[in-house]
Amino acid sequence: MKTTKTPRHEKQAELAFPFVSSCLRGLFLLLFLTGFAFPAEPKPKVAVFPIAGDAPEKTRERVGFSMRAKLDREGTYEPIDGARMIDITSAAAAPVNFTTPLKTVQELLKGSDADVAVWGEMNGSTLKMNVFDFQQIDPLPHEVAKRIDEPTDVRFVIEEVLQSLAGVKKFEHPNEEAVSSDAKSQQLWESNPNLVKDGDFSKQEGWTTLYQAEMYPPPLADALPDVDRVNVYRFKGDDGQPNNALVMNLSRGCAENNGMACLSDPIPIEQATRYRLSFRYKSDGPKLHVFVKGYTQAPDINGKMVAREIYRRQVPPTGNTHGQWQTVVDDLNPQHVVGKVTSLRIDLYAYLHPGMVVFDDVVLKAVGEQTRHASDDAIKKPLTAPKSRQ
């Protein structure tokens, strides 16, 4: 076999490369562990035009808003906000509907930086939409036509439209963990303490209002809050006794864009323990999406220990109660396949429709062992150690 002598400088490079590679791996591992985040690339923007047609205006607005909200939560794309889309559409010589040519849509979107356009109409109970990705080579828009016979159909029809976009995964819905109302959990529910600080809003502490850039503790007041504000309202209950409750007052602009939230202080929890959440609410319009968020402690880029969200439980959404009190009860099994969930925060979030929503008697208690365990096949250890090569 013929051999070739390697030049000295090439041999030095070969010897140095493993060291350089090891240093690079160590650097990336350090960046990962310290939470360093590289600048994210901008997401493709989606322009969802106001939906035309003869269906009720509120229904059409709801469908358009839901499309933008789902795109925002899914995270692959960035939706252009509804107010800007109304301004863009106002420049059209004729209503933008399902038959509007692609060329007209492109002209309207000049200067918007839109990468994807979604436009169409809803006549009666039939939604017909065009979806066109300007970054793809498809010559024609994708067309989606579906009937919406029940209010519950809206979610699935919207998801089918959005799943026609490249990169959008099939939408998954949180598992609705049924309340395991066994004798032991009931006994613990009755005897264990409420872990929520000021769950009855009697002490004016333990809660923070979040609305756009505003953050403030809800103040105590003898009157209902002004529009787009939150306060702890002091009133007489059904029994005639003084009572306090948290009240949110959402304008149409607030409800259809960011919504409004009130976040509890962190609640320390035990490992491998199931918890039960209960709260009362009444709404004359706003829809609720209450979340329970779980955190662990991890170092930031400076080595300081900070709270990082690693668990989220979405309580099944609820809506208008026409001013009547309703009680929501939900079980949660806070856990993560790698880190330990050490604390929880309750996120009372309202959106979609304007009006007032009232919260009271927020309770979180430990109710026994967990009934569901997280798993991830990607990090499971092999059943047997691999044999060494001979």
Image (spheres, rainbow, N blue to C red):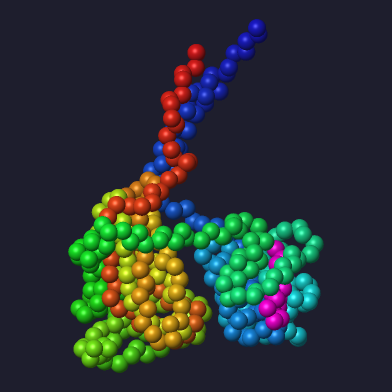
Q: Is residue 124 magenta?
A: yes
Q: Is residue 177 left or right of residue 14?
A: left
Is 129 left or right of 15, judged from the image as shown?
Answer: right
- Residue span colored magenta: 119-133
Q: Position of residue 104 (x, y in %)?
A: 77, 76
- The answer to which of 56 and 189 lies nearer the viewer is 189
Q: Is residue 236 left or right of residue 119?
A: left
Is residue 189 shown above or below 342? below
Q: Position of residue 167 (x, y in %)?
A: 62, 56
Farthest top residue in view: 1
Give x and y (percent) for residue 298. 32, 51
In the rendering, at what x and y percent does residue 334 appear?
Answer: 35, 55
Q: Answer whether residue 377 is visible to the viewer in this image.
A: yes
Q: Which residue does the image show at 37% across and 78% down from the upper left?
A: 326
Residue located 58% across and 69% down the image: 155
Residue occupying image coordinates x 64% and y 75%: 149
User: In the rendered image of this protein, does residue 132 appear above or below residue 88?
Assistant: above
Q: Is residue 213 visible?
A: no
Give 308 or 3, whichever is nearer the viewer: 308
Determine the residue positioned at 46% across, 59% down.
175
Marks counted in the figure total: 0
Q: Quadrant of residue 248?
A: bottom left
Q: Quadrant of residue 230?
A: bottom left
Magenta run includes residue 110 = no
**Quadrant including the N terminus:** top right
Q: Main secondary structure of the magenta part?
A: strand
